[in-house]
């Protein structure tokens, strides 16, 4: 490689270390609060650890179609930017939280699904938490791929999207630039995996330790279904 090209490559590598990853969380009414904030906390902690080394981490944005206040399923109101503000901006990762009211959201928010379809084609990586996988599937982004979602929605997902392979046991699944994960707190697992992919295992482990969570949980969603069922009285 010529010297000038070598110098240019070195400069690009150094620049990459100082530019934060742009992360856009796609918000909508009745989204799950922990689906959003669990993953965001991981990225915030990773940014803090990277800053100690003089490295850039993540520039995290929460955005909705029209911007403004969005009420979560739990009732907390979240302030959002408008997604139109990212039309000409590079996005490293789109992350779609889930909702306990996924059937209603799918019926009521077709424009959001249309936006996801177009934006995912431009983003370097697209991810979903919990039932957010339904929205990616509705956008046609998951056809022929293996995915994860909350175990409680497994039968509904398979019925609605037979062209997508649902892994009922997986905590999270990566298929090329598409990442999906199981329910609610699994967004933390997903975000840790994203951090590892971007910045290495050691950074991801430091974040997990600081948050007092598992660095990597085993793929076994059935344990949660069985455990919860065993706690119900025999007479229902």
Image (cartoon, rainbow, N blue to C red):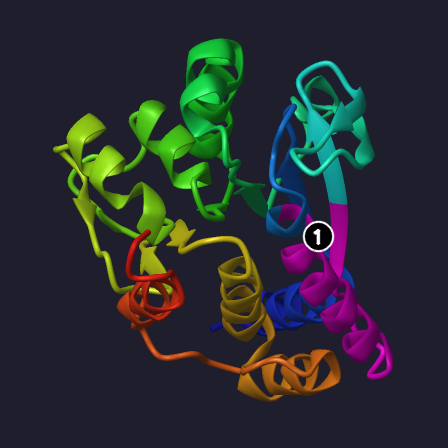
Instruction: Please identify the dominant SS of the magenta region.
Output: helix
In percent of the image, x 82 and y 32: which residue is there?
A: 77
Give the vertical position of 157 relative to 47 (above or below): above
Instruction: Assess whether residue 55 is covered by the magenta stretch.
Output: yes
Which residue is at 74% across, 65% downward? 57
According to the picture, the residue beneath numbered tag 1 turns out to be: 37
Question: Could you say where residue 189 lies in the image, as x and y percent from the top left?
Answer: 51, 68
Quarter of the view holding residue 29: top right
Q: Is residue 112 left or right of residue 21?
A: left
Q: Residue at the spot x=56%, y=70% of the render? A: 192
Q: How many labels sit on residues?
A: 1
* Place of residue 3 in the rendered image (x, y in percent of width and height, measured from the top left): 59, 74
Q: Secondary structure at mark 1?
A: helix
Residue at 13%, 33% in the rendered image = 163
- Look at the image and say whether residue 200 sits in the magenta stretch: no
Q: Which residues are magenta?
A: 36-60
Residue 93 location, x and y as percent?
A: 57, 47
Whether residue 164 is situated above or below residue 51 in the rendered picture: above
Using residue 171 as the reference point, say whether residue 35 is left or right of it. Answer: right
Q: Position of residue 97 (x, y in %)?
A: 56, 41
Task: Judge from the rendering whether residue 76 lies leftward or rightward of residue 39; answer left or right.
Answer: right
115, 211: nearer the viewer: 211
Front residue of 99 and 211: 99
Vertical placement of residue 51 versus 113, above or below = below
Q: Nearer the viewer, residue 180 or 11?
A: 180
Q: Residues within 10 Å of mark 1 (few under 14, many from 20)?
A: some
Q: Note whether 212 is above or below 232 in the view shown.
A: below
Picture quarter containing residue 31?
A: top right
């Amino acid at each position: 490689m010529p010297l000038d090209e070598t110098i240019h490559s070195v400069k690009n590598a150094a620049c990459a270390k100082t530019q934060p990853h742009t992360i856009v969380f796609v918000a909508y009414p009745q989204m799950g609060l922990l689906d959003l904030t669990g993953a965001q906390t991981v990225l915030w902690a990773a940014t803090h650890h990277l800053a100690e080394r003089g490295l850039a981490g993540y520039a995290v944005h929460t955005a909705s179609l029209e911007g403004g206040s969005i009420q979560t399923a739990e009732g907390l109101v979240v302030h959002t930017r408008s997604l139109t503000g990212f039309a000409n901006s590079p996005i490293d990762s789109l992350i779609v939280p889930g909702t306990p009211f996924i059937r209603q959201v799918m019926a009521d928010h077709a424009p959001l699904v249309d936006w996801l379809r177009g934006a995912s084609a431009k983003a370097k990586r697209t991810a979903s938490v919990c039932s957010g996988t339904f929205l990616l599937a509705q956008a046609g982004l998951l056809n022929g791929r293996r995915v994860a979602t909350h175990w409680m929605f497994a039968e509904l997902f398979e019925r609605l999207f037979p062209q997508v392979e649902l892994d009922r046991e997986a905590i999270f699944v990566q298929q090329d630039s598409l990442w999906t994960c199981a329910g609610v707190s699994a967004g933390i697992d997903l975000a840790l995996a994203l951090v590892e992919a971007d910045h290495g295992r050691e950074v991801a482990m430091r974040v997990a330790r600081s948050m007092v969570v598992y660095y990597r949980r085993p793929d076994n969603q059935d344990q949660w279904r069985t455990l919860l069922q065993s706690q119900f009285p025999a007479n229902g």
